[in-house]
Amino acid sequence: MKAVKIPYDQLSPEALHGVVEEFVTRDGTDYGEVEMPLGTKIAQVLGLLRSGKAVIVFDQGTESCTVLRSDDPLVKALG
């Protein structure tokens, strides 16, 4: 996989919101037994991005984005 980190603050507010919303509504995303409102999920991911605990990764092969924890081995391999 050829991937690059995308600094969240380099995206327009609209693009950032779109990436995060797509991530939190992705099939198979599980947040436990209690259903959370979409706005809460988005706010949590934005908080992780702003705190540096998560990063946006763009996979050039599939032309898709995901959000990964900063300590994920893939993120560490990207440097």
Image (cartoon, rainbow, N blue to C red):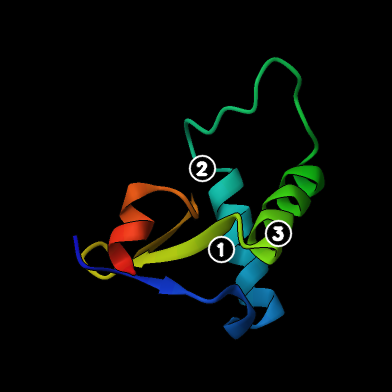
Which residue carries the number 3 mark?
46
- Please name which of the two marks, 1 or 3, marks the residue nearer to the observer: 3
Query: Circles 3 and 2: CB distance less than 8 Å?
Result: no
Viewer-proximal residue among 41 and 9:
9
- Which residue reaches farthest top? 33
Q: Secondary structure at mark 2?
A: loop
Crowd band around label 1 with a 10 angstrom C-alpha radius: few (<14), some (14–19), many (20+):
some
Viewer-proximal residue among 75 and 4:
75
Q: Earlier in the sequence, mark 3 or mark 2?
A: 2
Which residue carries the number 2 mark?
26
Find residue 46 and report its horizontal and vertical position in percent: 70, 59
Q: Residue at x 21, y 67 (%)?
A: 2
Q: Amino acid at mark 1?
A: Val
Crowd band around label 2 with a 10 angstrom C-alpha radius: few (<14), some (14–19), many (20+):
few
Query: Circles 1 and 2: CB distance less than 8 Å?
Result: no
Q: Is residue 78 above or below residue 20?
A: below
Find residue 25 and report its horizontal and vertical position in percent: 59, 43
Q: Is residue 16 above or below residue 30?
A: below
> Residue 14 is drawn in which quadrant?
bottom right
Q: Amino acid at mark 2?
A: Arg
Which residue carries the number 1 mark?
19
Q: CA distance from mark 1 to mark 3?
A: 10 Å
Residue 39 seen in this snapshot: yes
- Please name which of the two marks, 3 or 2, marks the residue nearer to the observer: 3
> Residue 13 is drawn in which quadrant?
bottom right
Residue 63 seen in this snapshot: no
Q: Earlier in the sequence, mark 1 or mark 2?
A: 1
